[in-house]
Image (spheres, grey):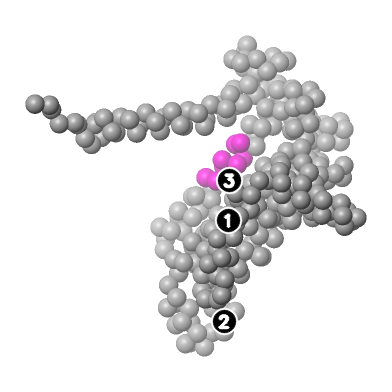
Amino acid sequence: MSMPTATGRFGIEWQLVKGITCMLLALMLAPICMVLVISFTSGETLQFPPPALSLRWYQEVWTMLVGPDAGIGRLRESLLVSLEIAALTSLVCVLAGVPASYALVRYRFAGKTLIEELIGLPVVFPAVVLGIALLVLVSASGLDFGIFQIVVAHSIIGLPFLMRNCMAAMRGIDPMLEEAARTLGASPPKVVWEIVLPLASGGIASGAILVFILSFNEFTLSYFLYSVDVFPLSIWLFQQANTSFSPAVFAVSSLIVVVNVAAVLVVDAVIGSRGSAA
C-alpha cells in the first residue's frame, strides 16, 4: 500500500512550484544583474566577471552629462529629449484616455464591446510594422513633425496601458456616489471633477507613470521616427553599442534600470497608502 503524497507547503507540488518560480526569476534577473555588475568594471572591455570593481564608468557618464564635451557626446541632449517625449506622451494619453475610459465604464452604446477589444490591439501589434507604417505616413505627408511624430507613435502603444488602469479604477467606484451628487445639484462635469477623478486618481497616476516608463524606454518606434534634431536616449544607447561598446553604456543602462524600479516602487507606495487610507 503506497503512502499518500505530501501536500501543503512541504509537499511535492509546493517544491515544484517554488523551483519553477525561482528558475523563472533567475532567467529574468540574470541579464539585469550582469549589466549591473559589468557597469562597475575597472577594465576597458566588457569582461564578465570584471577583473575589479570601480566607479570609473559612472564618473565617465557624469563627465558626458556635465563635462565640457557634453554637447559632442549628445548624452545629455538625448536624455532631455527622452524625458520630454515621455512627459508629452503621458500627457496625451491622460487627456485622451481618462474621458474614453469613463465613457466605456459608465455608458452603453453600440460597438462598446468591439472598442474594448480593440483597445489592446496596439499591444499585440508588431512594433516594427507600426513603425514602418508611421514612417510611410510621415514621408508621404512631406512634413517634419519633429518630436510630435514620436509622441504620437508612443501614445498609440501607451494608451491601452493607461486605459486599462483607469477603467479598473473607475469600475471600483460606486455609481450611487455620482447619482447622489447629481441629486444634490452637482452638474455632470462637477461630479466627474470632484467624485470620479479623486477616487480614480490612483489608477490614473499608475497608468501615467507606466506610460512614461514605456515611452522613455521605447526603441523600435523611435528608431523609425527619430531625426538628427530629435535624438532619444534609446537611439543613443543603440549607436554607442554599435560603435564603441564601452562599459559606459552599461553604466547608463544601470542608472535607467534603477530609476525605473524606483518610479514603480514610488507608485506602488502611493497607491498602497491611498488604498489603506480609503
Marks 3/1 in contact by CB < 8 Å: the verdict is no
Identify residue for label 2.
Answer: 188
Task: Please provide percent x and percent y for residue 22.
Answer: 41, 30
Left or right: 59 in relation to 278: right
Which one is earlier in the sequence, the residue at label 3 or at label 1?
1
Secondary structure of the magenta portion, mostly? helix
Residue kind at label 1, given as amino acid type: Gly
41 vs 258: above or below? above
Residue kind at label 2, given as amino acid type: Pro
Which one is earlier in the sequence, the residue at label 2 or at label 3?
2
Q: Secondary structure at mark 3?
A: helix
Left or right: 156 in relation to 171: right
Residue kind at label 3, given as amino acid type: Ala
Residue 28 in magenta stretch: no
Q: Secondary structure at mark 2?
A: helix
Q: Residue at x 49, y 49 (%)?
A: 268
Identify residue for label 1.
Answer: 120
Crowd rating for badge 1 (residues with CA inside 10 Å; few <14, some 14–19, many 20+)? some
Which one is earlier in the sequence, the residue at label 2 or at label 1?
1
Task: Please provide percent x and percent y for residue 26.
Answer: 48, 28
Check the image and name the residue furthest to the left.
1
Bounds of the magenta segment: 257-265
- The mark lying in front, picked from 3 and 1, is 1
Q: Residue at x 63, y 11 (%)?
A: 51
Q: Residue at x 8, y 26 (%)?
A: 1
Left or right: 114 in relation to 172: right
Q: Quadrant of residue 226?
A: top right
Q: Quadrant of residue 41?
A: top right
Q: Which mark is residue 263?
A: 3
Task: Please provide percent x and percent y for residue 135.
Answer: 80, 49
102 vs 22: above or below? below
Left or right: 216 in relation to 266: right
